[in-house]
Amino acid sequence: MQEFQRITMDPKVMGGKPCIRGMRVTVGMVVEALAAGRTIEQLLADFPYLEDADIREALGYAARLAQGHEVTLTG
């Protein structure tokens, strides 16, 4: 089972939604932006504190959930 090290959930941050490394950037925001046509390069320019691996892990996390698989967070 894949573990996600860059995805965190904390009730004090964004209401406990899955976020990128404890920041106020949710997995949903990242996936929604990509679905709307933004590129990874555009997201990295918009959010310079994000890393390519953050975005790819957000996509992997969303894919696992969409497939109905259990998700393990290590953070």
Image: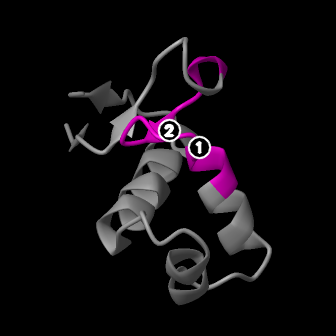
Q: Amino acid at mark 2?
A: Cys
Are there few (<14), some (14-19), or many (20+) residues within 10 Å of tag 2? many
Looking at this view, is 37 or 69 the one in front? 37
Q: Measuring from the top left, give residue 20's x and y in whole percent.
A: 44, 45
- The 10 Å Cα crowd at callout 1, few under 14, some 14 to 19, many 20 or more, is many
The residue pinned by badge 1 equals: 26
Q: Quadrant of residue 39?
A: bottom right
Disc 1/disc 2 C-alpha distance (Å): 4 Å
Q: Position of residue 25 (x, y in %)?
A: 57, 47
Magenta-colored span: 15-29
Q: Which residue is under mark 2?
A: 19
Residue 2 x/y as whole percent: 21, 42
Answer yes or no: do the residues labelled 1 and 2 have beta carbons within 8 Å? yes
The residue sitting at 47% across, 72% down in the picture is: 48
Residue 52 got which mark? none
**Name of the residue lying farthest toward the right:** 36
**Disc 1 marks which amino acid?**
Thr
Instruction: Assess whether residue 58 is covered by the magenta stretch.
Output: no
